[in-house]
Image (spheres, grey):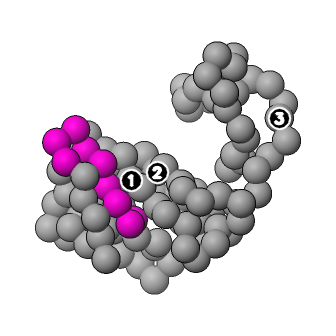
């Protein structure tokens, strides 16, 4: 995963997963330079654990970020009571749903 700066109006193209991304070849932003990471997900629990697509992309990327990076999950659904978590899973600090913003300690 590579992060680049995006400005409103920049041209976007769809990648192989049909996700729009900047089409210009811009210099990457280092993970250690980020203050906040927004994370799309399938489900979260009330402790901030995440369920994604099972490939570990975000856990590997978050491991490269500073320990104090703010991790914000984005989901259409409210959190469920519990999701099994592994030692390598990195929990969220916040979850934003259409109905509410959750904060996890």
Q: Is residue 2 above or below residue 66?
A: above
Query: Is there any visible trace of residue 73 in the rendered image?
Result: yes
Horizontally, is 90 left or right of 84 in the view? right
Q: Which residue occupies the extreme bottom position in the image?
A: 87
Earlier-in-chain disc, 1 versus 2: 2
Asked whether 96 falls inside the magenta stretch, the response is yes
Image quadrant in which the C terminus is located: bottom left
Q: Which residues are magenta?
A: 92-100
Q: CA distance from mark 3 to mark 1?
A: 25 Å
The one nearer the camera, 6 or 73, is: 6
Residue where numbered disc 2 is placed: 39
The residue that appears at 69% across and 46% down in the rendered structure is: 3
Tag 2's secondary structure?
Answer: strand
46 left or right of 88? left
- The residue singled out by tag 3 in the image is 26
Q: Earlier in the sequence, mark 3 or mark 1?
A: 3
The answer to which of marks 3 and 2 sits earlier in the sequence is 3
Q: CA distance from mark 3 to mark 2?
A: 21 Å
SS type, badge 3: loop
Residue 84 image position (x, y, % from top left): 29, 73
Magenta stretch: dominant SS?
loop
| Left or right of 20 in this view: 78 | left
**Can I make out residue 43 in this image?**
no
Callouts 1 and 2 close, C-beta under 8 Å: yes
- Count how many numbered circles sit on residues in the image: 3
Q: CA distance from mark 1 to mark 2?
A: 5 Å
- Circle 3 Cα neighbour tier, 10 Å, few/some/many (<14 / 14–19 / ≥20): few
Residue nearest the viewer, comparing 84 with 68: 68
- What residue would you read off at disc 1? 73
């Amino acid at each position: 995963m590579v992060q680049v700066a995006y400005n409103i109006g920049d041209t976007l193209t769809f990648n192989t997963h049909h996700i729009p991304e900047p089409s210009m070849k811009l210099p990457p932003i280092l993970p250690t330079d980020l203050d906040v990471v927004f994370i799309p997900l399938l489900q979260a629990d009330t402790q901030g654990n995440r369920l994604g697509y099972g490939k570990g992309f975000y856990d590997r990327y978050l491991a490269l970020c500073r320990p104090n990076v703010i991790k914000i999950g984005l989901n259409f659904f409210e959190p469920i009571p519990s999701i099994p978590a592994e030692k390598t899973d990195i929990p969220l600090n916040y979850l934003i749903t259409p109905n509410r913003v959750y904060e996890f300690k």
